[in-house]
Each structure stands twice: as structure tokens, then as C-alpha cells.
Image (spheres, rainbow, N blue to C red):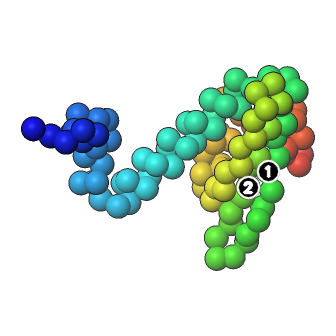
Amino acid sequence: MTPPGAYKFSNRQGSLEHALAPELRGHRRIQRIIDSLRLQILEAGEDSQFRIRRVFQQPKEVYRLEIQLPEWSYQRTTLLERDALEELLEWDGIRERMQQAGALGGG
């Protein structure tokens, strides 16, 4: 008999992720973050605000992406490397949405 509060995690999605190579785990995690950001940006209302700021240049370029959704009283801040930010901006509608909000300088 198992003690109360003990759960089997073997059937959960991603439970075998520990068996993957560390590089692959990291890449999958970054993809989940980018997908989450993409959905929030595309589903955000008209009064939402976005800001992108470079916070580090050396040893890697790191950017801070801020999303403010007043209709949900919600703010999200995410740090992204340049490659991840560029991948996010390549999605249809994301770059245009950021430009409309003034988060991207001029292009």
C-alpha cells in the first residue's frame, strides 16, 4: 500500500525528459517558453504594453521582454538570449505587434 500523497509520475508528459541529453532538454524548455510568449503576445488586448531592453552585451547578449496585460492585472518579465528573441520575432504577427506597441526601435 502506498502512503497518502504518493503519486506515480511515470504517465505524465515529460516525465522521461530526464533521460534526454541536457542540450535537448534545454532546447525543449526554450521552445516551451517561446511558444508561451508567442501566445500571450498574439492574444493580448489593445491596451497591452510590450518592452524589449538589452540588459547584457557580454559574454552573451541578453534581452528582457516585459509584457503588461492591464485587463488581467498581469505582468510578465522574461530574459531571453538574442537567438531566442529573434526566433520569437520571426513568428507571423509578433514583430508587427511589437512595432505597433513601440517595443522595437524602428525595425
Q: Residue at point 55% right, 44% down?
A: 33
Looking at the image, which is closer to me, 6 or 71?
A: 6
**Residue occupying the point 43% across, 56% down:** 26
Q: Amino acid at mark 2?
A: Arg
Q: Secondary structure at mark 1?
A: strand
Name the residue rendered at 42%, 47% in the picture.
Answer: 28
Left or right: residue 69 compared with residue 84: right
CB atoms of marks 1 and 2 within 8 Å? yes
Q: Residue 55 falls in which quadrant of the image? A: bottom right
Q: Residues within 10 Å of mark 2 (few under 14, many from 20)?
A: some
Q: What's the mark number on residue 94?
A: none
Q: Can you give x and y, in whole percent of width and height, for residue 89 in the image?
A: 68, 41
Sequence order check: which comes first, mark 1 or mark 2?
Answer: 1
The residue positioned farthest toward the left in the image shown = 1
Left/right of residue 2 with respect to residue 47 in the rendered view: left
Instruction: Give the labeled residue for mark 2.
Output: 64
Residue at image location 73% in from the left, 69% down from the top? 56
The foreground one among 39 and 8 is: 8
Quarter-of-image position of residue 47? top right
Residue type of the residue flagged with mark 1: Ile
Of residues 8 and 44, the one nearer the viewer is: 8
Q: Name the mark on residue 52.
A: 1
